[in-house]
Image (tube, grey):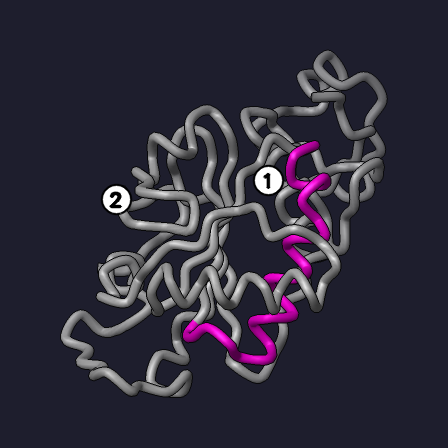
Amino acid sequence: MSIRINDVAPDFTADSTEGKINFHEWIGDSYAILFSHPKDFTPVCTTEFGAVAQLAPEFTKRNTKVMGVSVDSVEDHKKWKRDIEAFSGAPANFPIIDDASLEVSKLYDMLPADAYLPDGRTPADSATVRTVFIIGPDKKIRLTMSYPMSVGRNFAEILRALDAVQATDNTPIATPANWVQGQDVIVALSLNDEQAKEKFGAIDIKLPYLRFTKSPAK
């Protein structure tokens, strides 16, 4: 079964670099980002984990926890963390879970259910494990992004998408193309003009179905 927007994120319990973790309990009342990788000690993934380590204060400001998934053992993860920290110059203090069994990769539909990947597999064998999931405090999937092995993830875009998800949560607005924090937002079509003015104040009507307003404070 595919993982879709607004599905409840599948729960799991797994060993990690921070000990045994139950995913839903670990999320608590925070947002969460689950980002997956096909193998430890791979070049693109090392730069990505380093980027996450450097951005730790930004995720904390957004009440967001980050968890890495890689299809290797905790023992390998701990060795790899030394490389990540040496490369990035920042501590990698987020958990990386042991998915050597591919349980989480299959649970989140990143591999075929019948995938058989024997010991000695290469990153190419698990190349599809290159997905980002943004999950809300209600444990529902809010956004997914998938990347090929050759394309490093843009964590500025992941932060921007997280900001947009949080800005629009439980508020009748949407964000336009290329939106960043502080820019105007789109009024949802669920409100007519009078309701929109009552809720947000001034609105800028570009088209009958495209109305902008100042981004409301959260």
Mark 2 nearby-residue class (10 Å; few <14, some 14–19, many ≥20): some
Three-letter residue code for mark 2? Thr
Q: Tell me which segment is drawn in magenta.
A: 38-61
Using the image, tell me which numbered label, if any, was put on residue 13: 2
Disc 2 and disc 1 in contact, CB within 8 angstroms = no
Asked if residue 114 lies in the magenta stretch, the reply is no
Residue drawn at x 65%, y 60% is: 85
Nearer the observer, 47 or 140: 47
The number of numbered badges drawn on the structure is 2
Query: Residue 125: percent from the left, percent from the top?
Result: 33, 85
Q: Is residue 195 above or below residue 87?
A: above
**Res 1 visible:** yes
Three-letter residue code for mark 1? Val
Among numbered discs 2 and 1, the one appearing first in the sequence = 2
Query: Residue 132: percent from the left, percent from the top?
Result: 49, 58
**Res 188 visible:** no
Query: Residue 124: percent from the left, percent from the top?
Result: 40, 87
